[in-house]
Image (cartoon, helix red, strand yellow):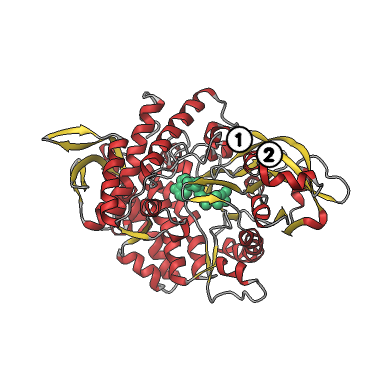
Amino acid sequence: MLASLRQSSPADTAELAAVHALLRCLIREVAAPREEVWPAEPYLFLRVADHLLRVRSHGGIALRFDGAAQELCGGTWRRLTVDRLAELTETEMTRRTGTANGEFARQVAESRDAVAALLHARERAVPPEDPWLASEQSLVLGHPCHPSPKAPGGPGWLRYAPESFARFPLRFVAVRRELAASAGDASALDRLGPAAPEGYLPLPVHPWQLELLHDELAEPLADGRLIDLGYGHGPVHPTSSVRTVYDPGGRVCLKFSLDVRITNCVRKNSWYELAGAVELSRRLGPVLESVARDHPGTRWLAEPGYRSADLGLRLLEGLGVIVRQDPWQVVGPGVTPLLAGSVAAPGDRSAAALAAACGDPLAWWAAYLDRVAPPVFDAYLVHGVVLEPHLQNVLIGIDPEGFPVEAVFRDMEGTKLVAGRHDLTGLPDGVAGPLTYDADRGWSRVVYCLIVNHLAEIAATLAGPQAADGADLHRRLWAIARDRLARYADRHDRHDRLTALLTGEPLPAKANLVVRWARSADRAAGYVPVANPFHLGDHDATALRSAR
Ligand SMILES: Nc1ncnc2c1ncn2[C@@H]1O[C@H](COP(=O)(O)OP(=O)(O)OP(=O)(O)O)[C@@H](O)[C@H]1O
Ligand SMILES: [Mg+2]
């Protein structure tokens, strides 16, 4: 959408994007479950709070829209603003849930304004030369199915926003050795900034978090439990999650706590997540090695250690930093990692652009599927590991021609072990509990992240609008996906879960609007059923033959 609107102002682009994002949530979570949405070419119609709305749509369950949405007002179709759509949403959601939410409309409007500010900032700033970093910093519109994807976390947010091409130095404190909290190997932190005096260890702090923890840090800094070391060696770059930064000099990623709300969560590394990330990294090594033997091109970013300061829970969690591998260190020679989310969005390195440059979109898609899907299914079915392969947690490695040759999986926070399939004795309950999912919950997470959040978006981008034969291409893409999945299922004794997917059972989609409306924690988010794209109709034999 960004590309097709290049001519319009940042404010207009942001307004339209905000309408589209909220509309996607309404269709998925409110109208579809009540059968109050229906297609009548070229429009999709829906009813919200007794009002009839319409928008031109394509892209299957990814719900891509062309142009403005409209509301029927006294016999005339009028352009729908996001303020009006938020108002209709408030009426509908209050009616359905019996609860009001006085901050919802403001969050929607602030998210729209933030997107406009980001677009504006990008017109003046210089993008990073590193193509992976550029992809991390390209998610200007954010999560496509969230009512307020870019609602800012607090004042001054633009200074630290990846999408504004921000770069900034980290601040370092020294923590007295006996007060240092750590697990695993966090020695990478020792070479990123000023050396700590004898008896202390260096600890990098995100400058935004330093501001937020100002009051809590005053005492330990005054009495010498901590020492302010000043700034690090060079600028770091925020990645798509905002709180994880890349240090190109140190060749490492650092996942910080940030006590601000980004989409559904205050981005704090809880004490058990700090320990859990390191524990999972230790256990995942052999699992991912085994997966990679069967599926060459499988890579992952280990989180080998964390460090913090044992100065009470607030500072232990607030200062906790997780060390994560640099993607450039794990990909093969000549391979460029790109954030899957950026490949799903329009642009020079979109799925459509890369596939077109290769000359065979169907072969490109088949290769993409083969890199991303089997490792995720293997991890779950063979090893009892739930990866979280949504668009922001996967990097696709492309060769110099732009062809998908590797997939890099990351983010231990969302990675879980299937309960009952791992020996967790010895781990404290507080760490073991959050590390595990029961088998059904884990499978829902896998299917949502991989198919609904990820592959459906890549397919929609590859197919493009229907006007350009997108509908036909879309069908052929899913025919290929179904064929790939059927072959995978054959190799795995037609596992019941895979068979159910192939029969077309509805898929789970995360209910971001409902969870935001209820102001609940992200982990409380439920799912709503959406159509299963593996069941689009008969196989297209031509499409299958031309996939390599
Ligand atoms: N399609 C998408 N699916 C999920 N998250 C998305 C998507 N597009 C953008 N995002 C954004 O990416 C972030 C994903 O959050 P997540 O919890 O996976 O990351 P994190 O744990 O904070 O950091 P990291 O990924 O660096 O470990 C959120 O800020 C979310 O809004
Ligand atoms: Mg993530």
From this view, report whether residue 360 is shown above or below residue 165.
below
Q: How many angstroms separate mark 1 from mark 2 (CA)?
A: 10 Å
Mark 1 or mark 2: whose residue is earlier in sequence: 1
Q: Residues within 10 Å of mark 1 (few under 14, many from 20)?
A: few
Q: In the figure, is residue 252 to the left or right of 133?
A: right
Closest to the observer: 151 or 422? Answer: 151
- Amino acid marked by disc 1: Asp
Q: Nearer the viewer, mark 1 or mark 2?
A: 2
Residue beneath disc 1: 130
Residue beneath disc 2: 248
- Amino acid marked by disc 2: Pro
Q: Residue at x 41, y 65 (%)?
A: 487
Q: Residues within 10 Å of mark 2 (few under 14, many from 20)?
A: some
Residue 527: which quarter of the image?
bottom left
From this view, report whether residue 493 is shown above or below residue 453.
below
The answer to whether residue 406 is visible is no
Q: Position of residue 342 (x, y in %)?
A: 48, 41
